[in-house]
Structures are given as structure tokens and as C-alpha cells.
Amino acid sequence: MNVPLIRGFEVVIGIETHTQLSTRSKIFSGSSVAFGAAPNTQASAVDLALPGTLPVANRGAVERAICFGLAVGAKIAPVSVFARKNYFYPDLPKGYQISQYETPVVQGGGVDFFVGEAAHRVELTRAHLEEDAGKSIHGVPRDDDDADASGGGPLDFHGDWSGIDLNRAGTPLLEIVTEPDMRSSAEAVEYAKALHALVVWLGICDGNMQEGSFRCDANVSVRRPGAPFGTRREIKNLNSFRFMQQAIDYEVQWQIDLIEDGGTVQQATVLFDPEHGETRAMRSKEDAHDYRYFPDPDLPPLAISAEWIERIRTTMPELPRERAARFQAEFGLGAYDARGVTASKATAAYFEAAARASGQPKLVANWIMGEISRRLNAAATEANPVPAEALAALVGRVADQTISNAAARQVFDALWQGEGRDVDALIEAKGLRQMRDAGELERIVAEVIAANPKSVEEFRAGKDKAFNALVGQAMKASKGKADPTVVGALLRARLA
């Protein structure tokens, strides 16, 4: 594989992803993990680390980790260990985080994806269970008018302030760590998108990046080709694919500039400032020994039997690659179309329903990957207002030549705007049924030829654009109801 170089340097990227698991309660307590609750209303005695409390592992979190491991072809450790990761963190009352270190529950595996048409695979080092920290909230000074307008409350006082919200402390995370396999920001983003789609498909994470359910840390370094790995800097808490690409691109240029100016990259943790489009150092980067890991004495080793793994395997959904292969075999789709309609579980189900109802899988795939995808992207939403059965009826009317492609777009626009769901009724109401009367079409073609002698002369002189202009005039005369293929054939016959 040709490795892309930037200003003569090779980029090396590894990604750590914190995936919030879709359990109803925290990883070591029964507290709710529902988003948006009032601060410190979802923190139990265990979360607060009050004396005499003991953690108990959440079975649902373990099962979601196993499900992920099976999906990526990893080894599920028969015995894994929870450890204490010691560091000062105001958002964790215990003074340490319960995580996994030497023996994670998921070991190895890989994620396959595409960058353009090129297939890529990123190997995974591990995926381990851990608890999330709470959240620090930092305020700013307010004047009396601002305080009154806000409705009062304990945070409405003069001067800077900070608060701690422990609702998130103890939320179950699966941290997914890659090998340093990626060589460009584009590759890193496509990996992150593929991983995001997979965990949502499996149902182990809701994937809501705005709420912090899926956030990535990118370890970035540069080196001359063939040289040992350079010193990495870790960009923390990237919760947007666009910001990830911007952050990595900026960091790469910053490191190259530093090296070319005779400097040395120092290992550090940095944050990305999207407002200014730059990374900024937050602290020096810790190594594993700085955290003084040791097995948590309050939690026994996590034992996972082969029977438990097999029970989870039998409940797993059909994986994206498996469904794409089935769509190729069952519906005759090409590899590109099959990947496109399995981009998400919802899209795959929508495609299958519409393809079966219409008997036109290729047309359905074209609409999903074309018009529907374009409109969803423009609206920045995943909510498709056109039911699968309506799309099936629409492509059926295109296939049997009841309406033209241009008319189909008008019907689809009406469906999208909620004007109705009955495709045939919309076709009749808008007068979009294709003109099939041969005599009427012959009359229109004859009139167009008579009214456009210059275009006729240019066509006979070998100018194809002139013929297209004649077809356009005929379609205009038919108010878009004529079949352009039939019009073209009639025109050629007449002009010959």
C-alpha cells in the first residue's frame, strides 16, 4: 500500500473511542444513566464513594462488550480483571477510576471500512470496560440583571465559580483502542464512522455524539518514511467527525512545523478549539505507570463462560457485512450499492422493505443513495418522512412507465412534504401520468420539427446538442408528460 506523505512526513494515527453502553443503569451501581437530569440527582452512595459501599458489575454492560468483541472477530477473555486507575480527578469522588488494564475483556479484532473505493482495515488492540467520570461545570461572572433574568438559583452569584455534576460518574463505557494503523485524517474519520455505525447497529450504544455517547481521542505523530514512530500527542474528546478531521490536520502541520524548525515534539494531551481551528496543550501526557494500576480488591475477576458467549452470539443481529453480502446475492446489487444501503440498520431495513414490495431493488437503491440521502443530509436529520411502501409504489410507476423520472421527482417531493402517501392519487392530482397516445406524440413531434428549422439543420449537420434541444422542446410541449425515450425515437424516425 502506498503511504501518503505530507511535506515528506508520514502521519501515524491511533484512536481510542469511549463508547457509552446502552444500559439503563451505571456500571457498578443501580443509578440511572438517563441524559439531561438535574445535576447530582442520579448519583448513588456507590457513585459518591461513601464509606461501606461496594461496587457490583453490571451484567448488561459485560454482555454488550462481548457482543462488540464477537462482531469484530476479537478474542473474549475467559477471565478479565478490573483495576484501579489512580489519579486526581475532581469529578470522581473515589480518587481513582475503575477500569481494565492488563487483562481486558475484548482482545484483538479489527474494523473494515472504505475510503472512497479503497478497502481498509484497522486492527484493534483491545476494548475494555470502565466507568465514566463526572462533569465539571465552570461559570462566569454575572451582574445583577443577568442573575434576575435567569430566575435566581444557587449558581447566580458574583465572581467565577465551578460546580461538579456526578450524574455521569459511573456511566458504563467500552473503550475501544486501535493499533497505530491509520495514515491520514480521512482514514481516521472513515474508521470512526464505521465504528460508530457498528456500535449503533449492534444496539450497544445510541451513538449520540452531541450528548457524549461516542467520543474519540486521536493519538497523532509524524515521522520520516522508515524511521521509528515519532512522539505522539493525544487530541482528547473529539465528538464530531468534522472536528476530528480538522484537529488531526492542524496537529500534523503543527508537529511538522516544529520539527522543521529544529524543535522536538513532547508527549502531551491537547484539546481542539473548533472556533480557532487549532489544538492547544492541556497537560503533559501520562504513561501507564503514572496511574499506579492495581487490581480492584472490591471486584472479583470477571469470568465469562463459553456458554455465555454462545448465548450472546445467537441473539446478535445480522452484521452489516453479512447483510450487504445477502443483498448482493438476493437482490443482485453491486458491491457499492450493497454497502450504501447497509450504511445503517434503519437504512438496510428500509431498503429491504421497499425492494421486496416493488420488485425493483436497483431503482430503490438509486433513490436511497441519491435523492433520499441528499435530502437527509441537507436537513441534517435521519428521519425519512417517506414510508418504504410509498417509495416502492413510486419506483413501480417509474418502472412500468406510468410516469417519467422527472415526474417521479415531483411525486417524491409531495411525499416528502407530507401532501399524501398514495402515489397513484398524487400522480392523478398533479396530472403527471405519461402521455401514451401515439397519435398525440406524433403531432407534437411534427410541430416541434416545423417550428425549429435551425435546430433540424444543425442536427443533420452532425450536431448532437441540436437533437437534445428538439427533445427538450417536445417535452416542453407535452408539459413533461411524454416519455423522452419515445420522443427521441419518433424524432429520429422523422428526421431520417
Image (cartoon, helix red, strand yellow):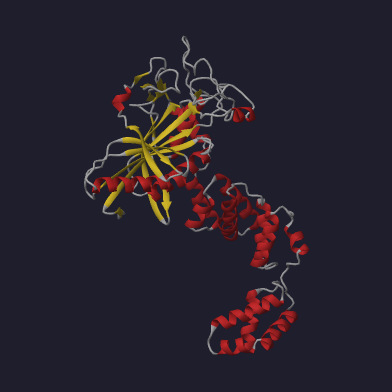
Q: Residue furthest front?
A: 144
What percent of the width, then of the height, locates residue 493?
63, 86
Along the line of sight, the residue nearer the viewer: 296 or 249: 249
Say left or right for 146 vs 432: left
Along the line of sight, the residue nearer the viewer: 79 or 25: 25
Quadrant assignment for the C terminus? bottom right
Quadrant assignment for the N terminus? bottom left
What percent of the width, then of the height, locates residue 296?
38, 18
Q: Is residue 471 visible?
A: yes
What percent of the width, then of the height, locates residue 150?
62, 29
Along the line of sight, the residue nearer the viewer: 63 or 329: 63
Q: Residue at x 24, y 50 (%)?
A: 225
Q: Residue at x 26, y 54 (%)?
A: 8
Relative to 65, does residue 58 appear above or below in the rendering? above
Relative to 274, does residue 158 appear above or below in the rendering? above
Q: Residue at x 43, y 27 (%)?
A: 130
Q: Residue at x 35, y 19 (%)?
A: 295
Relative to 284, does residue 230 appear above or below in the rendering? below
Say left or right for 231 vs 359: left
